[in-house]
Amino acid sequence: MINPGEEIIVGVMGQWGSGKSTASAALVEHLGGPDQVVFITDRELLARQAVDYIKGLDETKARRIITPGGTIKLEGDLAAVFLREGEALDTVDLNTLLFDLHDEVYDGVPVGGYSWLDLARLELGSLILEHSGGGKPIVIEAGFGTNTDPKGENPYSHTISDLFARLVEAGVSPKRVKWIIIEASYETRAGRNRRRLDTVPAVEFDRFAADGGDLEPDQERELVENGMVIRRVPNNHEDINRFRADIIQAYEVMFG
């Protein structure tokens, strides 16, 4: 249901393998389809950073490798992208691009202390401001996880609290977004990862997708008391139609 004049900004948050992409797609369809909805995903923003980084390298710093699987790996010191047959760097679909951001920092040095993920989340906030008031619902897809320390240096700021902090910094109150948090156990998410065609290696999955990064109960209670709308949807099963229905029900409760 969309009430005339009501601002619709709904955010879907979840860990790797939780089902957040399925949930976001269900919401976009429910709200009229891609032409009627502004869809923003942090994965695409991160992928664009990787592509822009590779495109900005001179030939002496970019490595081109043919992997055993036949994909073309374009790599610099801080990031790599993997192009499948028929894909080109200028036209690749950022939502399906395989990429790897090697380091915490951007362009080799900290930019105000920001990581790749911080920069993507700041851009997320800017896009919310850009598109709000335009008459279309906004659906956001954002991942979270435990803060991990990939190189014994500074940990990635991967939690929900970190996401909210970056939105505030970008000028967006997190209360302006109504949030759906998808809950799925590590065992469930790891099983889904193993069944994917583009499986993330177990070591990598364990590093970034371990349980953690969610709001603590007292944090969530305080946020809700201060006006934030949060609904939680469990997804420890493989009934996609049931899960989609649960997501739409959560949306209708928040905006009904």
Image (cartoon, grey):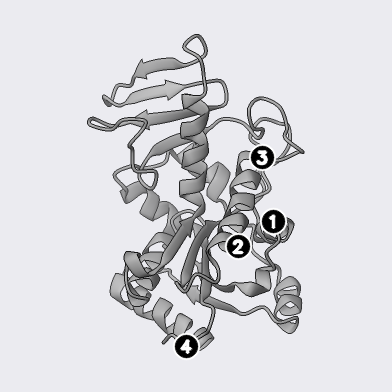
Q: Amino acid type of disc 2?
A: Leu
First along the sequence among labels 3 and 1: 3
First along the sequence among labels 1 and 2: 2
Residue 4's tag is 4
Q: Is residue 203 above or below residue 95?
A: above
* Distance CA(mark 1)–CA(mark 2): 9 Å
Q: Position of residue 187 (x, y in %)?
A: 46, 57
Mark 3 is surrounded, within 10 Å at the Cα level, by few (under 14), some (14 to 19) or many (20 or more) other residues, namely many
First along the sequence among labels 3 and 4: 4
Q: Is residue 148 above or below residue 126?
A: above
Q: Is residue 8 above or below residue 19?
A: below
* Distance CA(mark 2)–CA(mark 4): 20 Å
Mark 1 or mark 4, whichever is nearer to me: 4
Q: Is residue 191 left or right of residue 5?
A: left
Q: Residue at x 63, y 73 (%)?
A: 176
Q: Is residue 41 visible?
A: yes
Q: Is residue 73 left or right of residue 256?
A: left
First along the sequence among labels 2 and 4: 4
* Distance CA(mark 3)–CA(mark 1): 15 Å
Q: List the residue tagged with mark 2.
A: 129
- The quarter in which the N terminus is drawn is bottom left
Q: Amino acid type of disc 4?
A: Pro
Q: List the residue tagged with mark 1.
A: 170
Q: Position of residue 223 (x, y in %)?
A: 72, 76
First along the sequence among labels 1 and 4: 4
Q: Residue at x 37, y 74 (%)?
A: 243
Q: Amino acid type of disc 1?
A: Ala
